[in-house]
Amino acid sequence: MVEVFKTNVQDMDESEVLIYIIQKQVPNSCITFDLDDCDNILRVEGEDISPKCVIDLLNTYGYLCEML
């Protein structure tokens, strides 16, 4: 399963920290940011992904995140 999100993450360092945090919540997943895209895309690929969990997690750290 692949979930795709629009975010306001703009910095590669921020994305690396968020990838680490998300991987703790969604183990065995492949997580990438495409910060060159106008929507600063976050892709989470794996089993048992809860889009609400990912959105809430990023919101907790002060980032906007919504499903595409």
Image: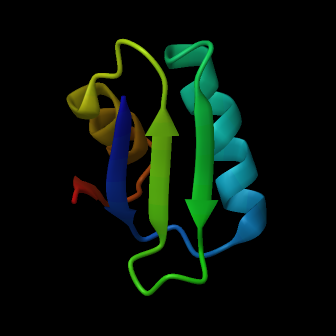
Q: Classify 42 as above or below 60.
A: below
Describe residue 59's horizontal placement relative to residue 22 as left or right: left
The image quadrant of residue 34 is: bottom right
The image quadrant of residue 54 is: top left
Compare residues 53 and 2 and report the one nearer the observer: 2
Describe residue 5's horizontal placement relative to residue 41 as left or right: left
Describe residue 10's horizontal placement relative to residue 57 as left or right: right
Give the residue drawn at x 58%, y 76%.
10
Q: Quadrant of the C terminus?
A: bottom left
Q: Position of residue 30 (x, y in %)?
A: 62, 33
Describe residue 12's horizontal placement relative to residue 48 as left or right: right
Q: Classify 3 as above or below 28.
A: below
Q: Classify 10 as above or below 55.
A: below
Give the residue drawn at x 61%, y 24%.
23
Q: Position of residue 29 (x, y in %)?
A: 58, 24
Q: Position of residue 32 (x, y in %)?
A: 62, 50
Residue reaching furthest to the front: 1
Give the residue drawn at x 23%, y 56%.
66
Compare residues 65 and 30 and report the one nearer the observer: 30
Q: Classify 67 as above or below 30.
A: below
The image quadrant of residue 62 is: bottom left
Give the residue drawn at x 60%, y 83%.
36
